[in-house]
Image: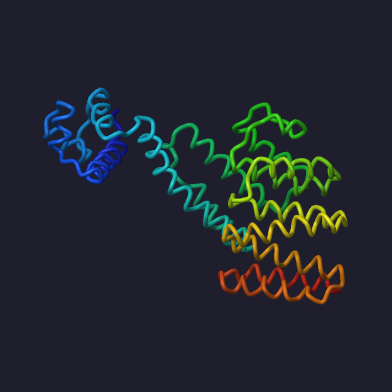
Amino acid sequence: MNNNCDFTYIGKEIRNIRKYKKLTQEDISFATNLSIDTIRRLESGKVDIKISSLLKVLDTLGIEFYNIFENIEKSKWSTVEKYLLQIDFSLNSLDFDKAKELLKDFEKLDVSQLSITYKKRYEQNLKFYIVILNENITNEQYINNLIDVIKINHEYFKIETFALHSFTKFELRILRTIANRLRNIGEIDLGRDILLFIESQINESSKDYPLLAYTISRYYDLDNNFEKSFFWNGKAIRTSINNNDILGLIYSYYQKGDLLIKQKDGKAMDYINMSFELCRLSGRKKLEENLKKYLIYNFK
């Protein structure tokens, strides 16, 4: 154990938990048979100590050894995650220029201190965004490149046998993105099966559920199966409200209006206008502009 950054984090965690449990450094010293000076230096992150001594302190505080190192990884990952949130916000707002700008900085991040598992996560995220922001590739290239992204963590992955694998939440997102493109190359049944498989892997309280339900609804809409499209759109609206998901509500309200336009229902614009209002309230001007363009196209 000789990573100064890690030890600083460990010392801070130990100090915070000790104070939370209303224990003094003297209490820890007495319980572990370590000197008070050692406890003080440990909490300040200024010294490396034997694993056996660290385990005594962690045991006294009721902290699992693997948990504290998992927290270290999460702390290092937080910088990466900030970029992911910003890139996703730009993508969901259809501000692709901003997303590309953020991606350039994301690609330059120093991830050398991350564990192998987190490095794979970073690599998957990076390559995923590179693919979806590339406007100059065919549908087949797009799908194959995303399959390669999944293979970073699943060496023998094949899209035809997708159900045989266990996926992370992000990998399920990659699958959903693949499913969106499969329809464009005529693989309708496979695309639908993937979407329904993803739905079986998450529950309705998941933050990913509203947009998934919206995607399934859109899939049936494109196949002119309006009964099922309305069914899944209803799920998208309900779970967006329950999960406080503004983006999901923007898309699902707009979709409900679009479906009603096709049914020549006079209530269509009520939902579409609610979608536009949510865009304004959440600062998604670019998304509102694009949705209005789609609306004009639908009225042609």
Q: How many marks?
A: 0
The quarter of the picture where the N terminus appears is top left
Q: Is residue 243 above or below residue 175?
A: below
Residue in the image at 12% along x and 30% along y: 35
Question: Residue 258, image x and y in percent?
Answer: 79, 67
Instruction: State the scheme by which the image is colored.
Output: rainbow
Q: Is residue 153 above or below residue 186?
A: above
Residue 139 relative to residue 211: left or right: right
Residue 239 image-quadrant placement? bottom right
Residue in the image at 73% along x and 76% along y: 270
Residue 31 image-quadrant placement? top left
Q: Nearer the viewer, residue 33 or 172?
A: 33
The quarter of the picture where the C terminus appears is bottom right
Q: Is residue 120 above or below residue 107?
A: above
Residue in the image at 83% along x and 71% along y: 261
Question: Residue 91, image x and y in percent?
Answer: 61, 58
Q: Is residue 112 above or below residue 107?
A: above
Question: Residue 57, image x and y in percent?
Answer: 24, 31
Residue in the image at 68% along x and 26% along y: 156
Q: Nearer the viewer, residue 218 or 199?
A: 199
Question: Residue 131, image x and y in percent?
Answer: 66, 47
Residue 114 image-quadrant placement? top left
